[in-house]
Image (cartoon, helix red, strand yellow):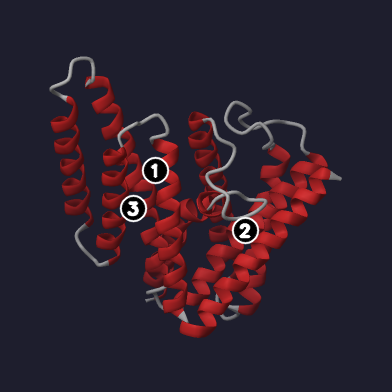
Amino acid sequence: MTTWKSFLTRATSALVALALIIGLYMAWAANGLKVAIVFAVVVGTWELKALLFHGEKSGALKAIFYALSLLVFAATVSSLSLGSLVYAMALIVMIISVLLYSHKDGHLDRMMTFQTKAALGFFYMGLLPAFAFRILEQAHGISWFIFLLAAVFASDTLAYVFGVLLGKHKVMPSVSPKKTWEGSLGGILGSLAAGLVCWLFLFPESSLLPLLILAALSGFMGQFGDFFESLLKRVADVKDSGKIMPGHGGILDRIDGVLFASPVILSGILILSHLLS
């Protein structure tokens, strides 16, 4: 009973979030969805800061990481050279950490830890959300964005249901004790179902097979994103990344799969556009 009560809470929370997203879309179309992405980045980066630097006492370092992560996202969606951007951010982090730590005995390991975590954070919340943002700028971008959310959320929902009903064999119990192979298979089936529905209502003139492959890959990568965020929480020794979404936790707990699936969808759009051109 507790499990299904938790599922009901998760479903209600997700429906409220969906209603807000639909409201933004109805008000400002693609720009409304971009606002939702920016909000997720602002809040999610704040949550990520707490996960990555849970043992870091320096508020200044956390603030630097937060500001630079948002700068990476803003610059990436503004069409700056990705290679130059990553190089510049890495250089800034290295300079800051060296200035703060290198003159202190016994702090070299702390300096390297900060550099590594900052680089990881820039990739996770600086670059990955930009792929979702870019999807909205493609031809039929809104339809593809719906495809992304449908594939990932259907995978998440069916993985939960299959895991509860049939789950016996753990995938990575040291990282996420409740996730099972049965749930993972259910998640892929959920993504395929979402791909079929999107084909019927969003892309009826397209070939079904490429869309099913793209949906399955998105669900697969979404599950990897879930495991990755579970690893971050395990290291930080926290249950959820935040409390903004009852039943889910924080923003990162809801969008972890979307982050990892976004590059798959954008790559799929570009490949299909090239093949059809």
Q: Which residue is mark 1?
A: 49
**Horizontal and vertical percent position of residue 204:** 60, 79
**Horizontal and vertical percent position of residue 226:** 55, 44
Q: Nearer the viewer, mark 1 or mark 2?
A: 1
Name the image quarter holding the N terminus.
top right
**Horizontal and vertical percent position of residue 182:** 73, 40
**Horizontal and vertical percent position of residue 21:** 55, 72
Look at the numbered disc 1 and give the secondary structure of its residue: helix
Q: Is residue 267 above or below residue 175?
A: below
Residue drawn 64% across the image and 79% down it: 201
Q: Which of the two discs, 1 and 3, labels the residue nearer the N terminus?
A: 1
Looking at the rendered structure, the kind of residue marked 3 is Gly
Q: Which of the two discs, 3 and 2, labels the residue nearer the N terminus?
A: 3
Q: What number of labels is visible?
A: 3
Name the image quarter holding the C terminus.
bottom left
Q: Nearer the viewer, residue 209 or 84?
A: 84
Q: CA distance from mark 1 to mark 3?
A: 12 Å
Residues tagged 1 and 2 counted as in contact (Cβ below 8 A): no
Query: Quick one: label 1, few (<14), some, or many (20+) residues within 10 Å?
Result: many
Q: Quadrant of residue 96?
A: top left
Residues tagged 3 and 2 counted as in contact (Cβ below 8 A): no
Q: Nearer the viewer, residue 178 or 32?
A: 32
Q: Nearer the viewer, mark 3 or mark 2?
A: 3
Q: CA distance from mark 1 to mark 2?
A: 25 Å
Q: Which residue is mark 2?
A: 153
Q: Which residue is mark 3?
A: 126
Q: Left or right? Give the position of 40 relative to 194.
A: left
Q: CA distance from mark 3 to mark 2?
A: 22 Å
Q: Left or right? Give the position of 157 relative to 47.
A: right
